C-alpha cells in the first residue's frame, strides 16, 4: 500500500479547508486554521490533527504502526 502524504484538513469551527503535506517523522499536535486562526489539537483518542480533522490519516496509522 502506498502511503499518502497529502491530507485536506477541515476546521471544525469555520469549515475552512486546506490540503497540507503530512510529516513522516513525527505527529503534528497543533495546526492553526488559516480561516479563523483557531489552533486545532487532536481529538481525544487521536494521535494528531490529521487523524482528527484530515481527509487522510497520518502515515503511522496508514502503516498500521503505533502512533507517536
Image (cartoon, helix red, strand yellow):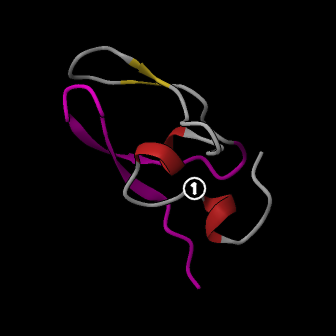
Q: Nearer the viewer, residue 3 or 56?
A: 56
What's drawn in magenta, residue-wise? Answer: 1-26
Query: Looking at the image, is 20 positioned above or below residue 12?
Result: below
- Picture quarter containing residue 6? bottom left
Query: Looking at the image, is 49 positioned above or below residue 58?
Result: above
What residue is shown with label 1?
Answer: 58
Q: Residue at x 78, y 65 (%)?
A: 65
Percent across and percent down for residue 23 are 59, 46
Would residue 9 be found to the left or right of residue 29 on screen? left
Q: Is residue 25 magenta?
A: yes
Would residue 45 be found to the left or right of residue 14 on screen? right
Q: Residue at x 69, y 60 (%)?
A: 60
SS at circle 1: loop
Percent across and percent down for residue 5 are 49, 60
Percent across and percent down for residue 68 are 77, 45
Q: Residue at x 65, y 44 (%)?
A: 45
- Picture quarter containing residue 3? bottom right
Would residue 62 be found to the left or right of residue 14 on screen? right
Q: Is residue 48 magenta?
A: no
- Picture quarter containing residue 16? top left
Task: Count residues near mark 1 (Cα–Cα under 10 Å), then give few for <14, some for 14-19, many for 20+.
Answer: many
Q: Main secondary structure of the magenta part?
A: loop
Give the quadrant of the N terminus: bottom right
Percent across and percent down for residue 66 are 80, 58
Amino acid at each position: 500500500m502506498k502511503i499518502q502524504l497529502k491530507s485536506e484538513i477541515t476546521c471544525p469551527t469555520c469549515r475552512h479547508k486546506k490540503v497540507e503535506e503530512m510529516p513522516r517523522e513525527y505527529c503534528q499536535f497543533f495546526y492553526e486554521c488559516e480561516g479563523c486562526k483557531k489552533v486545532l489539537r487532536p481529538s481525544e483518542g487521536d494521535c494528531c490533527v490529521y487523524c482528527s480533522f484530515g481527509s487522510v490519516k497520518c502515515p503511522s496509522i496508514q502503516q498500521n504502526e503505533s502512533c507517536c
